[in-house]
Image: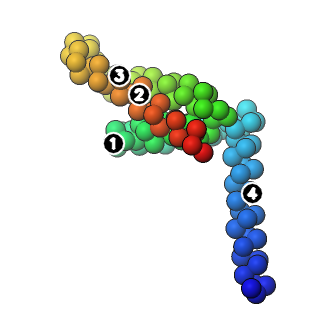
Amino acid sequence: MTATDRSDGDAGGDRERTIDAALERVRTEPRSHWLAVLVVVPVGLFLAWLHWLGLVVAGALVGFISPTVWHGLAGSLGFGVLVLVAFAIGLGDSAWRVLEMTPAVYVTVASALGLPALGALFRGVV
């Protein structure tokens, strides 16, 4: 092993420790956590706008910055409520007519709350 090989290995370890330290700071310091939330939520809303799998990814992002799995689940449910509000605002005057479509509304609400919660369970893996 040459000196450059050792330095490359150390650089990877340093990078890993830096990422771990930043993630720990986001999970434990309130200000860092809220800044991360302000970044993750708009990204999650954009991904959910693109495709329904974006709800799962958004839930995983919310769960990933949360200190515990339970906080991640609570945050993902809050994100799901935010998605439902954004959806209702996007519908405008048609929102009341959409509410009358009961089977479709059940699927919409269950998806908006359940898919981010499923993604937040990723926090338990990490």
Q: Residue at x 71, y 62 (%)?
A: 15
Q: Label 1 neighbourhood size at 10 Å, few (<14), some (14-19), many (20+)? A: few
Which secondary structure lies at badge 1?
Answer: loop
- Residue 109 is labelled as 3
Callout 2 amino acid: Gly
Q: Nearer the viewer, residue 121 or 67?
A: 121
Categorize mark 2 by other alpha carbons within 10 Å: few (<14), some (14-19), many (20+): many
Q: Which residue is mark 2?
A: 114
Residue at x-position 49% and y-position 25%: 77
Image quarter of the C terminus: top right
Q: CA distance from mark 4 to mark 1?
A: 34 Å
Q: Which mark is residue 51?
A: 1
The residue labelled by disc 4 is 17
- The numbered mark, 1 or 3, whose residue comes first in the sequence reads 1
Query: Do the residues under discs 3 and 2 have CB atoms within 8 angstroms?
Result: no
Q: Position of residue 24 (x, y in %)?
A: 73, 44
Above or below, 6 relative to 16: below
